[in-house]
Image: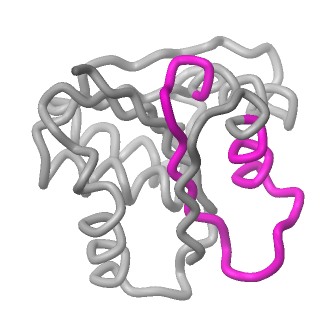
Amino acid sequence: MTRAVAITGTRSTGHRGLDSYAELFTSYLGPFAGPETRFYIGGANGVDSLSLLWLAGNTNAHIIIVVPGTVREQPAEARQAIIRSRDRITEVVELHAAELRSPAFHARNRWMVDRSGMVIGFPLAGPQGTSGTWQTLNYGAEQGKPRLIVPV
């Protein structure tokens, strides 16, 4: 059975160590990371880059990177994660948005959710807000897709 999972998460990750994220990904991505699984990841800084590196180094799942514009337009940290993982990335999807503003990021997130059977989100701990992570998780809920929410 092919499984497709969209990953969404905060860009603010400096409040935890890398070992902490590795433990979270082992616990919450690992059980879904079989050889038939496709993970859609946004290709940004923070959870996107950290989960990409973890998946590339610890699983044989398919990894699809989705960016709102082009990879060249992504922040340096995100580009470096993509370069380091290029031999493990199944596909890079560039949506070629004219402007890299909120509507382009929301469109990217909807694109990933639309192609996934579930959403795993790593929002900042605290009350639900209006971040892109929460918008993506809520869009998944509106589509009737299961969500796994792991506050960081």
Where residue 42 appears, x then y in whole percent? Answer: 53, 37
Q: Quadrant of residue 30?
A: bottom left
Q: Is residue 48 above or below residue 108?
A: below
What segment is highlighted magenta in the picture? Answer: 113-139
User: 63 left or right of 128?
Assistant: left
Question: How is the rendered protein coloured?
Answer: one colour
Q: Residue at left 68%, top 36%?
A: 140
Rendered position, 84 above or below 65:
below
* Residue 116, placed above or below residue 122: above
Q: Residue at x 38, y 86 (%)?
A: 17
On the rendered structure, is 53 left or right of 149? Answer: left
The residue lying toward the viewer, choosing from 35 and 101, is 35
Q: Is residue 131 magenta?
A: yes
Q: What residue sits 46% from the left and 47% below the top?
A: 78
Q: Nearer the viewer, residue 46 or 26?
A: 26
Q: Quadrant of residue 73?
A: top right
Query: Residue 22: percent from the left, percent from the top?
Result: 28, 72
**Quadrant including the N terminus:** top left
Residue beneath the point at 38% across and 59% down: 50
